Image (tube, coloured by chain):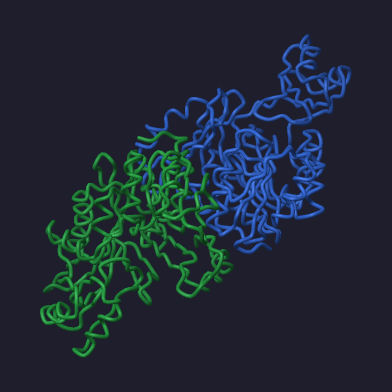
Chain colours: A green, B blue
Amino acid sequence: MLHPGQTIGILGGGQLARMMALAAAPLGLKCHVYAPAGDNPAFQVSAAATIAAYEDKEALAVFASAVSVVTYEFENVPAATAAFLAERVPVLPGPRALAVTQDRFTEKSFLRDIGLGTPDFRAVDDLASLEAAVAALGRPSVLKTRRFGYDGKGQTVIRLESDLAEAWDTVGRQPSILEAFVPFLREVSVIAARGRDGDVVAYDVCENEHRHHILAVTRVPAALDGEASHAALEHAARIATALDYVGVLGVEMFVIADGGRERVLINEIAPRVHNSGHWTTDGAETSQFEQHVRAVAGWPLGSAARRGEVVMHNLIGDEADQWRQILAEPGAHLHLYGKAEARPGRKMGHVTRVTPPGRA
Amino acid sequence: MLHPGQTIGILGGGQLARMMALAAAPLGLKCHVYAPAGDNPAFQVSAAATIAAYEDKEALAVFASAVSVVTYEFENVPAATAAFLAERVPVLPGPRALAVTQDRFTEKSFLRDIGLGTPDFRAVDDLASLEAAVAALGRPSVLKTRRFGYDGKGQTVIRLESDLAEAWDTVGRQPSILEAFVPFLREVSVIAARGRDGDVVAYDVCENEHRHHILAVTRVPAALDGEASHAALEHAARIATALDYVGVLGVEMFVIADGGRERVLINEIAPRVHNSGHWTTDGAETSQFEQHVRAVAGWPLGSAARRGEVVMHNLIGDEADQWRQILAEPGAHLHLYGKAEARPGRKMGHVTRVTPPGRA
């Protein structure tokens, strides 16, 4: 268990690390951010920073000796990096969470093994297995690389039989997974935290709207029937417990119609604080960032109570130019990430609007 | 007007600077903290730091060239420092706020001149003028140094006629002020902000409880009759406007019984974010720290709406050892200041408890 005054090491220097550091400080904890050279806005709010490659064992060893626990803001931490650090200092969430979530096929197999529904899927290793997979799952279906995909990168939809060779080229002819196309009603997510003591706290189910494969809007609570909502929360807790997870995780789900009822299928697990949980900073008693810090510090989790109806909009690219209007809007909470340059598709910030109960 | 990406310079590296920096980051602003060597917990969350004396003109010039506006966390910024910086970059709140509030006699004279009630007062420059002042104001009365007093330092209560020489020694035989003793019912404060455009936004009146001259507890809203509450808010706005103030200020007041009604007298103006406003981080739509940042950046002020009934307890000295219990208490918001050592009387943190409407 950490004590105030100790230091959390964070791998990655982007907005998630930055918001973790901003949440750690009020708890009396320092942050040391480790990231390769580049635009690392987390450095602006951290007590210490290391600029080095994730493969630099000398730098990693010095970093490990300077911190009391290591966490990360992205799921693609190289396994060798995590293993090297874990020999020296606790790395949380643990190596199993990384191993499972870095590979889409391993992840979906894990979900199936613990009894949770996902879109049907097949491993694809070559054009022949792609043909067999399409024959099994039908069209349309979605071909995704097993590793290193995010925000729609490394994936393509197969609609026509003639698409197969092109699709295989699109994903770079690397180990992939074919997923059945899900005619979902809507997309939701659950942000949950699990403490070192096994306690799980989840926020209310979030409803997400993507544009160009990037999260655009999150609304809480989600429009979802009670039973499906209950199931979504239970699924997230089951995943966290099965992974012996410590920290915050985001579980993305599809809502489908199943007879007259709604049912959730799990799309993806993010072993980290999650964009669809950004609303918690202004809209919940404890932010997902504070919750994550509490968990990895070995502290009790905080209350996930919501402060009202919440809508979070991402500010993508030049949408961040709206900062003046947002500042002038009563009750709008602006969050800018301190990035040097606004490129198209780049997450530059977000704005959260909370309608307290009784003021709707 | 500042733009996101620009830098705010802050004089002073303590908890107030630290909480300003934590509030500036989500608005996309960087902070550069300037402070003499020592325990400067604001450095832990700031993009840049300068360790130098306030008289070091070379360091001040470099600092001024690195920031877009300068503000401060304490009222005793040397006048020469403020003037030197103000030739190079805007210093907000402005020099008039510092000049008025650095000297208790000047401050009370200013308040009287703009028509506001204070405890009766007299300047004291020697033992003879102290005798005359005590004859005029009666006993008990309070002798305070005109400059550099805080948390009860540099002041003494005169109860007996024989106390005079001793009291004059106690304040160090320096220019002082004698204030009539006020048999107050309670102590309150108003935290208000004034923007560069002259707009004033005030939070609800706070009720404060001091122990050993240090703020112990703030409760919001204050138990105060409607007319007195209205007057308190108006007084703070009048002060801010008369000083052409930009930023957040705290106005400490005494509540006295006046016939059958309550009336407020002004005790002190703090030209900065104020301990009795710390509750706003968890208990209001916009924290006093964000409000201050918005003001000095030339941006619109945020909503001061309250989220419920709020109680803030300071954690003084070893009271900060309660952090474990506080973390385990649902709805309690812990704030530790990252100070290296817990000395008796030292403000180490605070905890805020908010009871939302309808849950009381």
Would residue B108 appear left or right of A125 to someone viewing this image? right
Q: In the image shown, does A78 or B242 lie closer to the viewer?
A: A78
The residue at the point 63 percent across, 40 percent down is: B13
Height in image: B82 above or below A271? above
The residue at the point 40 percent across, 65 percent down is: A311
Q: In the image shown, does A309 or A94 lie closer to the viewer?
A: A94
- Quarter that holds the N terminus of chain B: bottom right
Height in image: B202 above or below B116? below
- The quarter of the picture where residue B55 lies is top right
Q: Taking the image as drawn, is residue A336 in sight?
A: no
Would residue B252 appear left or right of B306 to someone viewing this image? right
Q: Taking the image as drawn, is residue A180 in sight?
A: yes
The residue at the point 72 percent across, 50 percent down is: B63
Q: In the image shown, does B198 or B54 lie closer to the viewer?
A: B54
Would residue A263 appear left or right of B313 to someone viewing this image? left
- The quarter of the picture where residue A67 lies is top left
Would residue B121 appear left or right of A321 to someone viewing this image? right
Height in image: B134 above or below A311? above
- The spot of residue A318 in percent (x, y) is 53, 74
- The spot of residue B291 in percent (x, y) is 60, 53
Height in image: B212 above or below A309? above
- The spot of residue B18 in percent (x, y) is 57, 43
**Number of callouts:** 0
- The spot of residue B345 in percent (x, y) is 57, 25
Instruction: Give the residue furthest to the top.
Output: B162
- Quarter that holds the C terminus of chain B: top left
